[in-house]
Image (tube, rainbow, N blue to C red):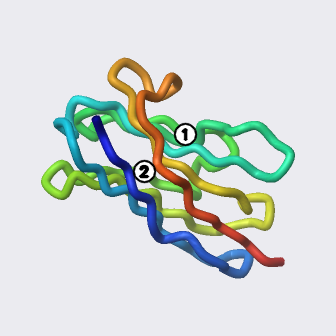
Amino acid sequence: QVQLVESGGGLVQAGGSLRLSCAASGRAFNRYVMGWFRQAPGKERELLAAISRSGGASYYVDSVKGRFTISRDLDKNTMYLQMNSLKPEDTAVYYCAVGGVTVRLPDYWGQGTQVTVSS
């Protein structure tokens, strides 16, 4: 069993920055591929970014490339999402997730944290 707790969401003006954190507890953190998803009202949940078990490889959806950076600290069992140049269309609930095989089919989810970007 893995427990994931997100933090760092909030209200920010367009062009601003936020850093989300996802603290993991439970089974070995480095066994899992990790990722960040988001879900805006009326839309499906989408994968934004993913990071490999070692942290050496990452993936980004086109809409956040160059603005968001995913990272993980194996010593702290924590994953981060640095979000810069935020836009109103980034407004959503952000979730972290982990997968033993792929983060596209997560085994565990966090509870989500709200990010609101005002224009």
Residue 115, quarter of the rendered image: bottom right
What type is the residue that disc 1 sits on?
Tyr
**Mark 1, secondary structure of its residue:** strand
Classify the position of the C terminus by image quarter.
Answer: bottom right
- The reply, left or right, for residue 119 in relation to residue 21 is right
Q: Residue at x 35, y 31 (%)?
A: 33
Q: Residue at x 79, y 59 (%)?
A: 89
Measure the C-alpha gap from mark 2 to mark 1. Answer: 9 Å
37 relative to 103, above or below: below
Residue in front for this viewpoint, 12 or 114: 114
Confirm or deny contact between disc 2 and disc 1 (CB under 8 A): yes
> Which numbered marker is on residue 60?
1
Q: Which residue is mark 2?
A: 70
> Which numbered marker is on residue 119?
none
Q: Residue at x 30, y 40 (%)?
A: 2
**Mark 2, secondary structure of its residue:** strand
Residue in front for this viewpoint, 117 or 2: 2
- The reply, left or right, for residue 78 in relation to residue 94 is left
Q: Which percent across, then down, holds residue 79?
A: 34, 53
Q: Earlier in the sequence, mark 2 or mark 1?
A: 1
